[in-house]
């Protein structure tokens, strides 16, 4: 269903590689950037996208990345600040219409409204998932072990 | 036996020497590249660089064929997980962990992991080696390849109460004389060593440590 | 609503955030961390619980946190092995009924399940969320 959608992913860590592999299987055309070559070993053999090694803010890397137009950019490096900057670059310089960034610091994820990015905060997701389990167990007056949400 | 040791520092070094002295096939897993190259240069063991609580590293270390996995890092959690993966994923029958906090012994044993409390055993033994006064080196001989030492047998030691013939004593070491309550005995296979005995040990350097360990319970 | 006695191990982003949320909704919360600097992640408004400085892989630290009374323990340090061990000790040695461990290395999740532990993986949750959002953005024409 996502055939031929062009997606730029910056950061090939656990999250970035997971997304790249999955979106690749869905038929997306992916460009993935990481400053560390060895990060690409997390990509599956079937991965057909472009691997770009280097600092995504470096001009030459940007030029290489920019040879395509993108439908979507995803910034999932380990640094919140960098992800925000990358999001801005993708939107303002590359004109990518949709940008999703990872923000680890929950206090920050709330104050990002101004950027109009779609944000994902793993910390919030995990906390919410745990709190939900606690509350639903309590609402049921139940002291059994909580059900695992992932199952 | 095929043995995998996980960890570093003095405990691993001494354990490795002890196992190698008995002709076991040894693999050491250590996460520090510098220490790995150091160990590789000094021990006849296979060295694997990596996190011993990682399944792929354990597999690389040969966990599938291992008879014993001994996890001796300074982190109890790492030791626990390494042992757990070794037994549940690779079916290793004997898994032993050094337990840094003696309080954790129970939880290890509850999971079928042999637990040695480091603070009680290895650590203190290794420290004792540094202030070791049970052994007096008397005479180096044969260009320094042979050492004659006097050893006082104290506390409990592996050979205690056993006939010398029963013991797997290293080939290149010999208990030449036993001094007991003013009596001097030339030992035979049926001589039994006891506490308070002083023995003269003649040993080639390669076997000395193992012999001392049998006589004292720790290395030198 | 019943108030729970909750121990949160690890006061990094996730641990502190959870401690704040749970404390704010009226639960009694104790946070454990090796590094007392990390307690600065707690919000002075939201958090009214206790702090214990110590290594949670030592049972004595858990005793200090009165683990015997805990209804729930959440192990949320940065180290998977520590989380798993603390969760195991809480469950097996101290009989805490509800125990959750955060997992970084998702390949190990199976092992943890075999040990009877509930796990939470922020990475997997984030992956799902990303995927959902990507679909929404690309498939439905997206949102700006």
Image: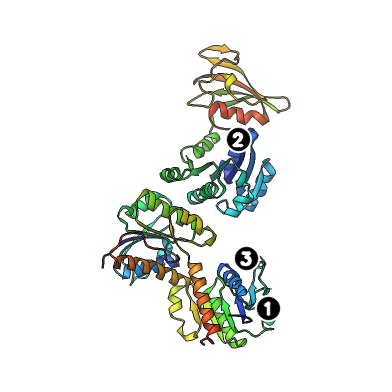
Residue C105 in sight here: no
Q: Quadrant of the N terminus of chain B?
A: top right
Q: Residues within 10 Å of mark 2 (few under 14, many from 20)?
A: some
In the image, taking residue C32 as reference, residue C106 lies left or right, namely right
Marks 3 and 2: in contact by CB < 8 Å?
Answer: no
Q: Is residue A1 above or below residue C1?
A: below
Query: Which quadrant of the figure has residue B46?
Result: top right
Mark closer to the observer (2, 3): 3
Q: Is residue A148 above or below residue B202?
A: below
Disc 2 from disc 1: Cα separation: 54 Å
Picture residue at 59% right of the left edge, 86% below the top: A96
Q: Residues within 10 Å of mark 1 (few under 14, many from 20)?
A: some
The lab-note entry on whether marks 3 and 1 share a chain reads yes
Determine whether the residue tagged by mark 1 lies in a helix, strand or loop: helix
Determine whether the residue tagged by mark 3 lies in a helix, strand or loop: helix
Query: Which quadrant of the figure has residue B101?
Result: top left
The residue most toward the top is: B183
Tag count = 3
Please give the residue where the numbered disc 3 appears in the rendered image. Answer: A42
Please give the residue where the numbered disc 2 appears in the rendered image. Answer: B18
Marks 1 and 2: in contact by CB < 8 Å?
Answer: no
Q: Position of residue B127 (x, y in %)?
A: 52, 37
Q: Position of residue B168 (x, y in %)?
A: 60, 25
Picture residue at 57% right of the left edge, 15% below the top: B190
Q: Residues within 10 Å of mark 3 (few under 14, many from 20)?
A: some
What chain is tagged by disc 1?
A
Q: Which mark is residue A53?
A: none
Please give the residue where the numbered disc 1 appears in the rendered image. Answer: A61
């Amino acid at each position: 269903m996502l055939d031929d959608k062009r997606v730029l992913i910056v950061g090939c860590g656990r999250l970035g590689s997971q997304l790249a592999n999955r979106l690749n299987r869905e038929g997306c055309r992916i460009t993935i950037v990481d400053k560390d070559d060895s990060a690409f070993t997390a990509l599956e053999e079937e991965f057909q996208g472009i691997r770009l090694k280097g600092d995504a803010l470096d001009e030459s890397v940007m030029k290489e990345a920019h040879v395509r137009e993108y439908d979507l950019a995803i910034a999932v490096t380990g640094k919140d600040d960098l992800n925000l900057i990358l999001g801005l670059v993708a939107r303002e310089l590359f004109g990518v219409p949709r940008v999703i960034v990872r923000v680890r610091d929950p206090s920050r994820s709330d104050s990002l409204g101004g950027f109009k990015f779609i944000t994902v905060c793993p910390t919030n997701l995990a906390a919410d998932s745990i709190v939900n389990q606690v509350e639903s167990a309590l609402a049921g007056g139940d002291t059994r072990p909580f059900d695992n949400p992932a199952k | 036996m095929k043995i995998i040791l996980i960890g570093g520092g003095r405990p691993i070094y001494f354990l490795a020497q002890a196992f190698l002295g008995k002709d076991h096939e040894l693999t050491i897993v250590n996460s520090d590249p510098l220490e790995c190259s150091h160990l590789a240069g000094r021990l006849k063991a296979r060295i694997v660089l990596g996190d011993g609580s990682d399944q792929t590293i354990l597999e690389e270390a040969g966990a599938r064929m291992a008879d014993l996995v001994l996890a001796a890092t300074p982190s109890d959690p790492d030791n626990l997980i390494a042992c757990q993966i070794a037994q549940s994923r690779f079916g290793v029958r004997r898994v032993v962990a050094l337990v840094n906090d003696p309080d954790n012994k129970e939880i290890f044993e509850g999971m079928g992991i042999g637990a040695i409390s480091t603070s009680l055993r290895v650590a203190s033994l290794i420290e004792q080696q540094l202030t070791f006064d049970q052994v007096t080196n008397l005479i180096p001989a044969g260009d320094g390849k042979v050492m004659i030492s006097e050893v006082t047998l104290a506390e409990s030691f592996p050979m205690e109460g056993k006939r010398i013939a029963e013991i797997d004593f290293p080939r290149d070491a010999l208990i030449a004389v036993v001094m007991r309550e003013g009596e001097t005995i030339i030992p035979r296979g049926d001589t039994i060593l006891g506490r308070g005995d002083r023995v003269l040990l003649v040993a080639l350097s390669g076997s000395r440590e193992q012999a001392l360990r049998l006589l004292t319970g720790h290395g030198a | 609503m019943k108030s729970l006695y909750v121990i949160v191990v690890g006061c990094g982003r996730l641990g502190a955030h959870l401690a704040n949320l749970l404390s704010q909704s009226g639960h009694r919360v104790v946070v454990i961390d090796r590094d007392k600097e990390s307690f600065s992640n707690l919000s002075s408004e939201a958090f009214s619980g206790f702090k214990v400085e110590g290594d949670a892989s030592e049972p004595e630290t858990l005793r200090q946190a009165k683990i015997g009374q805990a209804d729930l323990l959440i192990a949320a340090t940065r180290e998977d092995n520590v989380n798993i061990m603390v969760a195991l000790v809480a469950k097996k040695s101290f009989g805490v009924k509800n125990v959750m461990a955060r997992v970084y290395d998702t390949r190990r999740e199976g092992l943890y399940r075999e040990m009877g532990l509930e796990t939470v993986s922020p990475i997997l949750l984030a992956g799902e969320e990303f995927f959902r959002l990507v679909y929404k953005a690309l498939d439905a024409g997206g949102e700006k």
